[in-house]
Image: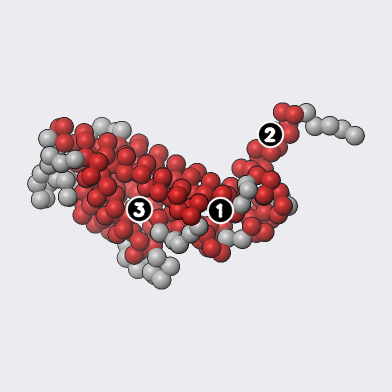
Amino acid sequence: MVVMPARARQRKRQAARARILEAARHAVARSGWKDAQIALIAHRADVATGSVYRHFDSKAELYAEVLAVVSEREIAVVAAIVDSGGPAAQRLVDAIYMFCLRAMRARQLAYALIAEPCEPEIDRARLKYRAALAEQIRTLVAEGIERGEFIDIDARLAASCITGAFMEALVGPLAPEAAPGSRNSKELARSMAALAARMVFRQSAPRLQAVSRGLR
């Protein structure tokens, strides 16, 4: 009998786990948390159904990990805009715009990440995701206050209000009963960004592009 070296076994295990996560992400993107079935995930990942539970203790744990992985990607997109140069006000509009646009381009997955009813384990992971997003907005608001671009306000409070505003606004277009493509996604994303960011602007209508040229 040929015994596989420990390092090779570890690589094989990691590869199987990665396939399961990707298959689960695909399933959630198609049908949400409730209807994403473990048997179908296992089939897509080319593993036995029981093998899924050797990597994850429960379906909820698997989905919480999916949420964490996808959320990290979305936070990274926002963080790249936050860390780029230029006026804080423009970057704030751009960050919200890009988050909203990406959400509307993957409606079912975004709805699962933001608002779909789910198990407590998934909801706890979702709250961490929302807090991480708000922290990116807080960093940008604090910079804008220091530069004199934004009103003098508690940056953490402002970030919570801004994040809550655009995420709540997204739920309508992302909801299962909403007709996809009923309105232009870019138009909606620009409107959400302008409205959510405006609450901290010193001017009611600052001279900003609807969104930076590179994000059009």
Say whether marks 1 and 2 touch (CB < 8 Å): no
Position of residue 17 relative to residue 31, above or below, is above
The residue under label 1 is which amino acid type? Answer: Ala
Say whether marks 3 and 1 touch (CB < 8 Å): no
Say whether marks 2 and 3 touch (CB < 8 Å): no
Of labels 2 and 3, earlier in sequence is: 2
Position of residue 81 relative to residue 167, above or below, is above
- The span from disc 1 to disc 2 (Cα, nearest Å) is 25 Å
State the image coordinates of residue 111 (x, y, percent, origin top left): 42, 59
Q: What label does residue 101 carry, if any?
A: 3
Residue for point 15% across, 41% down: 153
SS for dot 3: helix
State the image coordinates of residue 35 (x, y, percent, origin top left): 56, 64
The residue under label 2 is which amino acid type? Answer: Arg
Q: How many marks?
A: 3
**Which residue lies under the disc numbered 2?**
11
Neighbor class of circle 2 (other Cα within 10 Å; few <14, some 14-19, many 20+) is few
Neighbor class of circle 3 (other Cα within 10 Å; few <14, some 14-19, many 20+) is many
The residue under label 3 is which amino acid type? Answer: Leu
**Which residue lies under the disc numbered 1?**
60
